[in-house]
Amino acid sequence: MKIRFLIKSLVCFIFAACQNNDTDKNWTVYHGDKSASHYSSINQINKENVTQLEIVWEYNTGDHDERSQIQCNPLAIDGVLYGTSPQLKLFALNAATGENIWTFDPFQGKQAQGVNRGVVYWTDNETEVIFFSAGSFLYAINAQTGRPIMTFGTKGKIDLHDGLDREGIEKYDIVSNSPGIIYKDLIIMGMRVSEGEVAAPGHIRAFDVRTGKRKWIFHTIPHPDEFGYETWPADAWKTVGGANNWSGFSLDEQRGIVYVPTGSPSFDFHGGNRHGSNLFGNSLIALNAETGKRLWHFQTIHHDIWDRDLPCQPNLVTLYQDEIKVDAVAQLTKHGVVFLFNRVTGEPIFPIEERPAPGSLLTNEENWPTQPFPIKPPPFSRQVFTEDLITNISEESHAYVKEQLKGKHYGHKFTPPSEWGTVIFPGFDGGAEYGGGAVSPKGIMYVNANEMAWILTMVMVKSEDKKGKIGKGRQIYMKNCAVCHKADRKGGLEFSPSLIDINKKYNREGIIEYIKTGKGRMPGFRHLPEDELNVLVDYLFDVKTVNWENLDTKTNPTEREIPYTFTGYNRFVDQDGYPAVKPPWGTLNAIDLNKGELLWKVPLGEYPELTEKGIHQTGAENYGGPLLTGSGLIFIAATKDEKFRAFDSENGDLLWETQLPAGGYTSPMTYSVDGVQYVVIACGGGKMGTKSGDSYVAFRLPENLN
């Protein structure tokens, strides 16, 4: 029996090797594995045959609207694909045919809130569970039936408002958009919170996978007697929010270390209520995955006032320094640099310098005097906006942007926010963004980047009487709504429509309910008192009979801890809507993390109408990361031109491209079924003004090539 078993094992091993690494056939974790490598050793599709890829199936969820998106990097496990729809329905498909097996709708037909970037798989070899988050809830769903596991939390779900160690935040906006990560019998979770003045704290928690019971919590805004408490004003933990993980985790399973990147404290652009360096905002934190205890940390931005959240999972890599093997962790940033650390000790692999940064230009603000600059690797996107970077695609564009630049504040990587407008470059969405980067087993990182400038303009929050121009309704609007819908109520971003004449689309009760609960990317504002909600709607509906004098509570904006809001997220563009900087506007980069060197950089994406005019190699704004395969291919969609491409990882040569039904603003994935390799990308569109979609598209080689 023993000999027969050994022979059978050897045959299985040989068969697996001949089936293009079939042992690596699954895609079981968000972005490939717990090291966030975005890598699969499957190599059936290679540089020679990639041009023969064809669509083998397309699954339409049927539930998108004009502003919806799909940002999900799905899982594929033993022939079953698990993903989410624009309205955050969880589904299981036959991974070879795209046929639906089951669908679970957490909102039961109502409008979904937020986006979902992936799901989590766990099994104890008896039960298979898909954990996924929708709105403020974490669900445990039976992977075979699509039904909630009733023993988890309350009838299959837990509310992420609960167990945050702060009172009175039940109505605060909390949405979990990126999947957690499994360590033993724990699921470790982050969440997205409001980035405005009123926000929940972004603490990290671990829950029992069977019961949903909280097992540990790490306070990212430290409580008294905890490390980092002194980097905030006294008792800031009771009122300040943010410092959250919305971008996901990576895990060194062998060592039991989870790596947590965090975002900025709230409010994003002014820290009058949080003087200090603000640990653990904008930090890479190494925690004991069993207990949640801090092992080490590094803060990439001190006292962030630029919205420089760490936007993606860190990559766990093995490097060679002077022929010595080093287990490292690499963290990409919005401002276009890579921080590299020893995975165990937290020591930098290459030097990091603290350099002086400009002082504040705003009332009641205290900028941190220095900021960290990694010496290696070099930045993978341009770092400082200057006049010589003004677009050169035409004389008209150059002249227009130069005129718009007058009076703006720029010229330093950390130019502070201002009332006359500050050029943020790299822009609010990177540099790197939520798609993250791929890393090869040899320590080569591949990352796409945006090369876009944005304009940040701060405005005083004033409350004047009826003879003034603002009034209480305007004040409430500027604090809570202007971030997305702009100060003039005309909207602008893909998820923020104009509110002009909103009373023609909604009645009073409808708009109040909309504001309370949120919709799609819009968060809910349940924390607003009823009187403020009514005054806000009066302002939106242009009611002229409001007694502003009786509603005034603050007449001197300098008395406020945060006396400012801002006019919204505004891309800096020319008269035709093209980026204000010289091309390239989007790039794909290869970085040798062993040596800290940039290997190559190529434009990513194009504007077809500019190409027709002879303006080539512009690159395009992009969202969503790469996939790297064992055959040396980089698959990436991401771009505004809605194409899907394959590049040669050795030199960045474009090998193949195809048009998608809608933009693929997420990372692709790959797997094999019965020895056949598939590559899948979610096509949800809905960003950068592109159309929304509702499909997952699967590619494979023709049958005669498999």
Image (cartoon, helix red, strand yellow):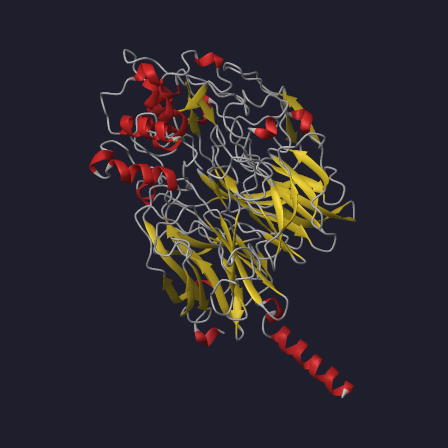
Residue 144, position in %: x, y? 50, 70
Q: Is residue 521 left or right of residue 468?
A: right
- Which of the two residues, 363 or 237, is positioned nearer the viewer here? 237
Q: Position of residue 152 (x, y in %)?
A: 56, 58
In-front residue for pair 399/379 = 379
Q: Residue visible at 46% across and 41% down? A: 586
- The reply, left or right, for residue 55 in relation to residue 330 is left
Q: Could you say where residue 77 lies in the image, as x and y percent from the top left?
A: 54, 67
Q: Nearer the viewer, residue 214 or 405?
A: 214
Q: Is residue 559 above or below residue 656?
A: above
Q: Is residue 369 left or right of residue 5?
A: left
Image quarter of residue 183 = bottom right
Number of marks in picture: 0
Q: Position of residue 686 (x, y in %)?
A: 36, 46
Occupied quadrant, residue 11:
bottom right
Q: Residue furthest left?
A: 504
Please say if 400 is above or below 79. above
Q: Taking 377 as reference, is 392 left or right?
A: left
The reply to whether residue 391 is visible in this rendering is: no
Residue 261 appears in the rendering? yes
Question: Which quadrant of the figure contains the N terminus?
Answer: bottom right
